[in-house]
Image: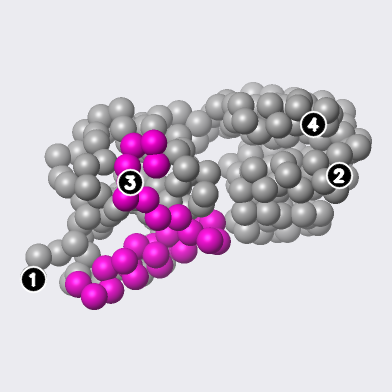
Amino acid sequence: MKKIKILSTKILNKNLREMFDDKKFDLFEHDFIKISSLNFELPEHNGSWIFTSQNAVNAVFSISKNINLIFNKIYCVGENTKSILSKHGQKVEKNLKNSSKLANFISKKAKNEKFLFCRSNIKNDDFTAFFKKEKIDLKEIAVYNNKPSSVVLKDRFEAIMFYSPSGIKSFLKNNTLGSSHCICIGETTASYAKNYSSNVLSCKTPSIKHVIDKTIKLFANE
């Protein structure tokens, strides 16, 4: 039986990799995004904090063991981000599935708060513009570097697993989607993928495990 070729645009840990039946699937992996910390100093801030990725949390906590002393309210995106914050002893005020839903929640429930957004070097223009339009006080600081690490792939894949719009951009630098199914971690990534493919699926719960589950179920009858 010919194996189903799957590409993960992020190298998976052993437990996630073992979710695939190696008799049925041929799994390829490459980190299309390289993450590295930036040199930064957090400003004094007694308002609320926003984290939309676990990379931002890791970067902030890497600069000080006592960083938890400065936090007030925290708003975040994704269960993984919330989990890492919790491991550092932080209580999350509100966690939502994507940045758009978080911005809408803040505009309705926390409009008068002052926010500091810890993000990557790649600015989310829509997120920033929304806060400006709603006249919500938002300051931003880049705490980690998100750099493309694209490679040319000669294989064609039945499905490609994407975890961020930047991962899609990196992939497309040297490759095309063709007829591959694009399995995306959430609505933001799926929305970007739809600019290049009509064969896009997204997960209701944004996590790598759910991306894998959805990919496996897609080929359940094959």
Q: Is residue 38 or residue 139 the one in the foreground?
A: 139
Number of residues whose C-alpha sits closer than 10 Å to that of mark 1, classed few (under 14), some (14–19) or many (20 or more): few
Circle 2: element type? loop
Whether tag 2 and tag 3 are in contact, CB under 8 A, the answer is no
Number of residues whose C-alpha sits closer than 10 Å to that of mark 3, classed few (under 14), some (14–19) or many (20 or more): few
Question: Mark 2 or 3, which is nearer the eye?
Answer: 3
Q: Which amino acid does label 4 sit on?
A: Glu
Q: In this view, does 75 lie to the left or right of 144?
A: right
- Residue 147 visible (yes or no): yes
Please tell me whether residue 188 is drawn above or below residue 16 in the rendered image: above
Q: What residue type is labelled 3?
A: Ser
Circle 1: element type? loop
How far, Cα to Cα, is label 2 from label 4?
11 Å
Per the image, the residue denoted by label 3 is 198
Per the image, the residue denoted by label 2 is 110
Whether tag 2 and tag 1 are in contact, CB under 8 A, the answer is no
Circle 3: element type? loop
Q: Which of marks 1 and 3 is nearer the N terminus?
A: 1
The range drawn in magenta is 194-222
Per the image, the residue denoted by label 1 is 1
Q: Which of marks 4 and 3 is nearer the N terminus?
A: 4
Residue at 61% from the left image edge and 26% from the top image edge: 125
- Residue 38 visible (yes or no): no
Q: Which amino acid does label 1 sit on?
A: Met
Question: Mark 2 or 4, which is nearer the eye?
Answer: 4
How far, Cα to Cα, is label 4 from label 3?
33 Å
